[in-house]
Image: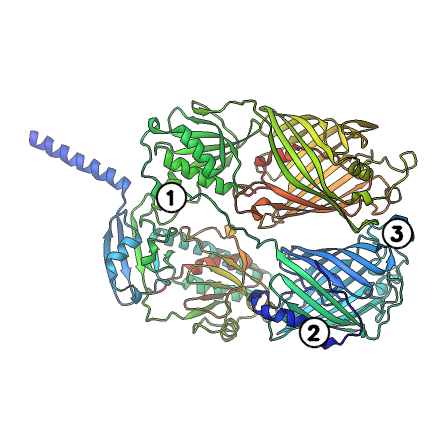
Amino acid sequence: MMNRMFQTLVAGLLIVSFTALAQQHHPVTLTWKTATSEHNYTINPNATLGDFLAQQVNDPTVYNWAASRLVSDDLTRQVERERTAVLAELNLQKQSALSSGESERAAALNDIRSWLAALPLAGSHFIGVPFYQLRAHKNFNPQMQLPKQRTQLTLVSPKTQHVIKAEVVGAVNSPILVEPGTDLGTALERAQPNPHALDSRVWLIKQNGTVIHMPAAVYNQNQAAVCYRHETALPWIDVEQWQGIDCWPDEAVNEGDIIFVGLKNAVNLNKRISQLLKHRAIFQ
Amino acid sequence: MSSMKTVKHITPLFLLSAVFSVTKVQAQDISEHMIGQPTQSDFGGVGLMQMPTARMGRSGEFTLFYYDNEEYRRMAFNMQLFPWFEATIRYNDIRTRLYSSSPEFSGDQTYKDRGVDVKFRLWEESKWIPELSVGLRDLAGTGKFAGEYIVASKRYKNFDFTLGLGWGNLGTNDNISNPFCEVTDRFCNRPEGTTARGGTFETDKWFRGDTSLFAGVEYQTPWDPLSIKVEYEGNDYSDEVSGTPIVQDSHFNYGVHYRVTDNLNVQLSYERGNTWMFGFNLRANFNDIKQYKKRERKRDKSDFADRPVDMQQVDTDKLVTDLRAEGGWLSHNIALSDDGKTLSLTGYPIGYSNQMEALDRSSRVLLTELPDSIEQYQFIDRVLGMPMSQTNVDAVKLEDNVKQRYLTKHDDIYRLTEVNESQDNTLYDRPFELGWPRVSARPYLVQSFGGPENFYMYQLSADIQMNWQLANNFVVTGALGVNLLTNYDEFNFLVPGSDEAPLPRVRTYIREYVTYSDVWLDDLQATYIKQWNQNLYTSVYGGYFERMFGGVGFETLYNPLNQGWAIGIDINYAKQRDFDSYTGFRDYSVVTGHVTGYWKVPKLDDVLVKVALGRFLAKDVGVQVNFEKKFDSGIIVGAYAAKTDVSADEYGEGSFTKGFYLSIPFDLMQIYDSVGRASFGWTPLTRDGGQMLMRSQRLFGVTEPRNRYYTESDLYK
């Protein structure tokens, strides 16, 4: 009898202790994926990304840190919710175009919708700087947990030997890959924007998360672009809150750039799709 | 600014080489993004030479401009207020005419003509359709260079082509029939003559009479700083204000535009087939201007080591000192709620023009100086003893962010609310104590341009200012002026005495005021303010309001929190101050007051419009509209106009009161943070109609935390 009571007491104390512990420190599990390998780790909840990588990486030059992403399930759910909303809006605009007899615009909207629906997305934190600089980088060396929930992360790291081509997507005849260094005008010409494309200004999504609304026509080449800088610690914000500033970026596309050609008369929708493209999965 | 006077018949190559030999060394200094940007015309404003283009500069572009030729010298400033709207204010110096035929009045000064130009973009350029703009030149001056145009510009590679239709001064060549004349006969003839008094919108002339086609092209050369311009102009110089015949040997003009640096451009042109012209301009963009700041280090996760574990360990005096030094927060009262979870801080931010910076720094001080049992900080802005607004800070989430506990930071830490003051357990209280007045000094410049005696009239004075809070809601403010430099003693414009003048002389005794003494009492005003509730305020005040008027009055303002609008009323009994003594009054008195509405226009970024309806100093009744646009740097460009029941004839030259001003944050001029501003005004003419009483402690300014506009904050609309 005493034994049973003691066992029950011990079990109860253990449950209470683990519950209390779990409320303070949520377990973090991390899968590290490269193009050729995949490893699972359990992380001390207070550990930072810098701590983890310092233990695991022998030669930091092997990995392309600028393109690396820390994918979280939580953020991916948020991205998927937005994708669903954008798809619904595209469908609404398609129906509206059909009812007003604009069948070609409806077809263009449908093409964008199909492409977006099939796009692999992964809500990601951008790493952006070599990991060995993270500790010194006061804006980004956070602990790897998420508030009030268990944390499941996937670190996706391409290798430096693999050149990530830029890509032109959106209202084009077919998405194309372009070599880094290609002039933006040439890239667009090759992608052949469709008649409903707004090709005078395109959206350029950089590897570091900056989104640039970029003049792309011959006649507006001297106008300022508008840069929406990515805030590392806020990887997802309402596009209505994007604060753009005038900027003059390089006209050549760089490694990993995504050039999104939007639709005419769809400014807000184009902006929302641009934010979704920031979270496009690098590889499955 | 210095100038290079233009001469005729000098070898073009000589001048070209002279200009470029001075500047080519610095050619590499220009930024890549300046290449191909729109350039200024001879009149000021984006254009070719004599003719405008449809182009607009970047929003926020500000250009100071000088241009010189045989007959005219032009000084202007040009402002791109919005991407679709450009305004230019210009003085034309007519070198061939004297200001007046009376040497006693204006000496040998040449004639000056004021003008305002505006241009609106109607259509932005697209693949096949050109940019299309409509503009009005010299629309509110004497109309001597008045003209209207509709113009289109289309770019092809490095060529920017322009084609337009001009009327008035831009259409005297009359090379095409007026298309509006085809619609209605009213547009076939343009009424002749100009308005001597100026200042009116002569809409009955717009787009009427002779019409000319004009065209041109600007070519951006492969050499980045240089562009070349060619134009065919619509003016044949048959109707010019110069009073001398201006020969036009050719309708074609040729020019080169050279960017010396990002901020300095020069333009040289050969116009009319016989005349060289030269000009330069200085530019800046009001959205881009920034200033390095020397600040205290902001506290971070390394500062938590000495954090107290309970309130017993808190050093309140240190807390108050650190809040002031690092967060610019002047504490009046600090209290802890009964449950120990909420700390209320009543006081006022005095350090930073950006409220978010002040909140972030102050909250980090609290995080590291208080135990983690406190979950919320409440910052209550109190002005003259009146609580105005409250910002709640979620301390738990802020700590997560500062310590970088999570991959994603919280973005819902600050919340603006109405004040909910509770002082359960007072930790610190600084009751009001009558102290000495705060005294400060500043240079102050009164100036006017384009006067007959001297083009630029000024008085530079040292203003010794005083602010003395006698009780929580009671303040006395004043200023003593000491003349340092002036040429207002040359001012000899004397309107007839009050018996003969159509309006009481409420402002035109300026010379008498300025020349009476080198030391004067500018203002001395006592103000009591009552807060009825958080939305409603009343002030009563009396004393010497300004240099020309004193009296008593009251103001009531309804200012709901963060609604973007407010409305108020003020009524004043004002008596004119004596200009022959320091403190006396003249016989003239007036009851003046206005109902004033304030509105932050939602669709226009950082635009504040004020509309005041009521009775002005000269007992005229009407409306004053005031428009302010704030740029990213915090610089405010403002314009106002007052139209009353005084006729244009009674008002005199200028027709109605109007003016412009620039308000520059001290933040841009110094490396230390400040909430102050410096203002520079430009009033074309001082006349007696449409003049408002000036006084300090206006309630819209006092209650700034209710609807922030002059300071920055992300929490407000």
Q: Chain of mark 3?
A: B
Per the image, the residue denoted by label 1 is B300
Q: Chain of mark 1?
A: B
Q: Residues within 10 Å of mark 2 (few under 14, many from 20)?
A: few
Taking the image as shown, residue B188 lies to the left or right of residue A138, namely: right
Taking the image as shown, residue A279 lies to the left or right of residue B75, namely: left
Which quadrant of the figure has residue B145?
Answer: bottom right
Q: Quadrant of the C terminus of chain B?
A: top right
In this view of the protein, which residue sits in the foreground, A169 or B712?
Answer: B712
Q: Is residue A30 visible?
A: no
Q: Mark 2 belongs to which amino acid?
A: Leu
Point out residue B389 in the picture as x, y percentages from the top left corner: 53, 33
Mark number displayed over residue B16: 2
Mark number displayed over residue B196: 3
In this view of the protein, which residue sits in the foreground, B552 or B603?
Answer: B552
Tag 3 and tag 2 share a subunit: yes
Whichever of callouts 2 and 1 sits on the residue coming sooner in the sequence is: 2
B641 is higher (above) or lower (below) than B65:
above
Point out residue B608 in the picture as x, y percentages from the top left corner: 65, 44
For the residues marked 3 and 1, what is the alpha-carbon distance in whole angstroms?
66 Å
Whichever of callouts 3 and 1 sits on the residue coming sooner in the sequence is: 3
